[in-house]
């Protein structure tokens, strides 16, 4: 136990606090926090759905949960059920085998809900496109509020996408 | 036909690794598979192709591994009698591959025990086969209701827990059907295929250059291994050898991919026992490495850095110094964390004896890659059949004989250490020169093979060429094909709450097998 405490103290706080006050990321992090409070009024619960991705986008969602980004400190957390979620974060082209599961997950998410489509595949079907096996982009299956491009999008880009969706919540859909 | 003779009787492909290939009759096909099975060899991949456009029928191809190297058998299959000998009794891992061949090409293994569909759920009707050349990839098929016949388990107090396809964590989709008594798992049945997005059909008609990007997206966490195996397959049909410097840089990328995935898994394995400290620590290290990847090579996961003919990145002396400094940093931190892991009684209690696959069972079922090595299955392509530059590196294989979660943790720690040693050798010996060459044209009707030890296990890419440097058929093979069925055995007798831990200790790919 003392070894663990020693290592925690030695590691220090990794969560990024850039040196200069005008640093872009610092502004971004504060802005995200303020936007979430303004528009959701509380923490943001996200349910991730892999609708057919290559698992590349999942890697960056995992990374978003590391100490550098400290999203829980911003009031964002991932939940195990769509019934607990404010937002669906959907990756992949939607495979036809996942179409029903995605629709049911969307229906199980209480209103009002937000949908962020992640990655080039989520945006436009990406390299897999539309075919006998793929429905293509997420918006072909469920309504999408924000689509974040990238292969895969970086954790910061994912955060920005989440912010964009949250900040447009005030505008009627 | 005797197995001992295949290195002299069969032509050797101009591949990066020792690979022999020949067309065989149904009797020879079955006979050679029996001999490979009896001499302790293994089946790596099984796939099919449609040759009807050239006036022939179909073909079934099997990639086997015996002591001298890989043996690829091509069995021509008549159009009016699309069947081939069952291999499931010799190699249990063949069963799902055979079911996939039946779904995708309509060729059936005679006498196979399980005739249920595997990759086909409801997106296309039975009797329609997407990998046949007559199938229109763009046409949306009439959806069929999916009525999969799970194996029922009955008895006093037995009940079922269905999980998925949408899982509770950030993981890929698949369905797990647990039959349990109280907390104890009697049986697990996996149902995969949810992420089937038509990858193999997508490859067809692409140019050899275009295919590289798609190959790097078969399973995102193994993008380097797939890209390298694909490049090897293309270079095999073009009869080209990339410059030395490119080959050494490819090995740098592959070992970085191995380290970053192992770091992530070691973090999650602690997390799954409730020790969030382990997750936090290892994911800081992983992020440090990903950021350096991005700065040195232009992509955090090194996607699209390996291309047919060489690499699309380079490393200058400043970059080499930064990478060496990162290795020092990682080695220092990992040593501290390994001590903490080893001495954490609560976590070790969850790891030890959990999800055990005994060496005998692992050998029987064909457990491969990292999980196989943790169950005494001493196979590593980098060691037994090394391509350049591994042929000059003397890679040390990490193995363990306990076959439990704890063993798979130890093998990961050991492999990180070995990858760091290899990276230092690679940086020291990195040859000067070009990083990419232009490829010669490929003749149609050729077979090219790529064979790379990715972080999860061996990845094989089989490429059949069409005219004009295009792809006639491409099969990317993930080691998860072999290991998913073994996970069903690893969970037996364990308690349901240990499933996430056992599953993570294997960390298999869904996209890589759903294709």
Image: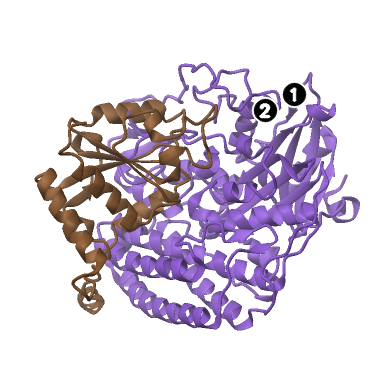
Callout 2: SS: helix
Same chain assignment for discs 1 and 2? yes
Q: What is the letter of the brown chain?
A: A
**As drawn, is B473 to the left or to the right of B165?**
right
Quadrant (top left, top right, bottom left, bottom right) of the N terminus of chain B: top right
Q: Earlier in the sequence, mark 1 or mark 2?
A: 1
Quadrant (top left, top right, bottom left, bottom right) of the C terminus of chain B: top right
Q: Position of residue B9 (x, y in %)?
A: 90, 51
**As drawn, is B75 to the left or to the right of A11?**
right
Residue occupying the point 22% across, 60% down:
A28
Q: Position of residue B414 (x, y in %)?
A: 48, 70
**As drawn, is B5 to the left or to the right of A162?**
right
Q: Kindly identify which chain the residue marked by label 1 belongs to.
A: B
Residue occupying the point 50% across, 31% down:
A134
Q: Which mark is residue B82?
A: 1
The reply to whether residue B11 is in sight is: yes
Q: How many marks?
A: 2
Nearer the observer, disc 1 or disc 2?
A: 2
Chain B in the picture: what colour?
purple
Q: Which residue is denoted by mark 2 in the rendering?
A: B105
Q: Position of residue B257 (x, y in %)?
A: 50, 63
Give the quadrant of residue B96. Answer: top right
Callout 1: SS: loop
Q: Give neighbour class at mark 1: few <14, some 14-19, many 20+ (Cα, 10 Å).
A: some
Give the quadrant of residue B288. Answer: bottom left
Give the quadrant of residue B105. Answer: top right
Q: Position of residue B246 (x, y in %)?
A: 66, 69
Q: Kindly identify which chain the residue marked by label 2 belongs to.
A: B
User: What is the distance, in whole Å, between disc 1 and disc 2 at their CAs?
Assistant: 9 Å
Front in this rendered view, residue B70 or B399: B70
Front in this rendered view, residue B282 or B488: B282
Would you say the residues marked 1 and 2 are in contact, meaning their CB atoms lie under 8 Å apart? yes
């Amino acid at each position: 136990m003392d070894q663990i405490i020693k290592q925690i103290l030695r590691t220090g706080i990794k969560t990024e606090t850039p040196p200069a006050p005008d640093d872009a990321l610092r502004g971004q992090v504060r802005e995200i926090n303020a936007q979430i409070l303004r528009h959701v009024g509380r923490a943001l619960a996200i349910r991730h759905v892999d609708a057919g991705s290559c698992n590349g986008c999942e890697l960056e969602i995992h990374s978003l949960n590391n100490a550098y980004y400290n999203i829980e400190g911003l009031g964002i957390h991932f939940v195990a059920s769509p019934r607990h979620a404010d937002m669906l974060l959907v990756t992949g082209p939607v495979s036809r085998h996942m179409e029903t599961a995605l629709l049911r997950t969307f229906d199980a998410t209480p209103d009002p809900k937000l949908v962020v489509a992640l990655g080039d595949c989520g945006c436009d079907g990406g390299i897999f496109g539309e075919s006998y096996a793929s429905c293509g982009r997420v918006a072909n299956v469920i309504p999408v509020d924000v689509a974040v491009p990238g292969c895969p999008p970086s954790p910061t880009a994912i955060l920005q996408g989440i912010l964009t969706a949250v900040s447009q919540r005030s505008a009627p859909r | 036909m005797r197995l001992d003779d295949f290195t002299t009787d069969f032509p050797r492909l101009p591949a990066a690794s020792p690979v022999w290939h020949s067309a065989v009759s149904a009797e020879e096909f079955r006979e050679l598979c029996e001999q490979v099975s009896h001499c302790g060899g293994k089946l790596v991949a099984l796939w099919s192709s449609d040759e009807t456009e050239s006036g022939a029928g179909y073909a079934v191809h099997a990639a086997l591994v015996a002591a001298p190297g890989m043996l690829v058998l091509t069995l021509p299959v008549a159009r009016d009698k699309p069947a081939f000998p069952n291999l499931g009794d010799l190699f249990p891992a063949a069963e799902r591959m055979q079911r996939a061949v039946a779904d995708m090409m309509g060729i059936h293994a005679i006498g196979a025990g399980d005739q249920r569909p595997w990759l086909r759920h409801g997106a296309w009707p039975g009797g329609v086969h997407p990998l046949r050349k007559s199938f229109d990839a763009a046409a949306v098929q009439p959806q069929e209701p999916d009525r999969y016949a799970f194996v029922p388990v009955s008895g006093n107090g037995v009940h079922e827990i269905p999980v998925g396809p949408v899982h509770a964590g950030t993981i890929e989709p698949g369905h797990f059907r647990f039959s349990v008594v109280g907390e104890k798992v009697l049986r697990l049945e996996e149902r995969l295929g949810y992420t089937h997005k038509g990858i193999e059909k997508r490859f067809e008609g692409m140019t050899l250059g275009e295919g590289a990007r798609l190959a790097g997206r078969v399973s995102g966490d193994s993008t380097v291994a797939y890209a390298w195996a694909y490049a090897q397959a293309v270079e095999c049909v073009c009869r080209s050898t990339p410059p030395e410097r490119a080959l050494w840089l490819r090995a740098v990328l592959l070992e970085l991919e191995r380290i970053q995935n192992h770091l992530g898994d070691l973090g999650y394995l602690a997390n799954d026992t409730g020790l969030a400290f382990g997750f936090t620590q290892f994911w800081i290290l992983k992020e440090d490495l990903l950021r350096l990847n991005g700065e040195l090579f232009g992509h955090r996961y090194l996607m699209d850095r390996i291309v047919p003919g060489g690499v699309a990145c380079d490393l200058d002396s400043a970059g080499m110094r930064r990478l060496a400094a990162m290795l020092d940093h990682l080695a220092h931190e990992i040593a501290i964390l390994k001590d903490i892991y080893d001495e954490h009684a609560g976590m070790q209690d969850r790891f030890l004896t959990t999800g055990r696959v005994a060496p005998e069972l692992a050998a029987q079922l064909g457990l491969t890659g990292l999980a196989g090595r943790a169950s005494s299955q001493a196979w590593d392509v980098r060691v037994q059949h090394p391509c350049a530059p591994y042929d000059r590196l003397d890679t040390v294989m990490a193995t363990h004989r306990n076959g439990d979660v704890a063993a798979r943790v130890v093998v990961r720690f050991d492999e990180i250490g070995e990858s760091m040693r290899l990276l230092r050798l690679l940086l020291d010996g990195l040859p000067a020169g070009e990083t990419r060459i232009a490829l010669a044209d490929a003749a149609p009707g050729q077979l090219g093979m790529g064979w790379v030890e990715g972080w999860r296990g061996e990845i094989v890419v089989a490429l059949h060429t069409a005219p004009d440097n295009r792809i006639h058929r491409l099969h990317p093979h993930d080691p998860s094909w072999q290991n998913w069925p073994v996970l069903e055995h690893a969970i037996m007798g364990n308690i349901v709450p240990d499933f996430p831990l056992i599953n993570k200790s294997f960390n298999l790919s869904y996209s890589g097998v759903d294709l």
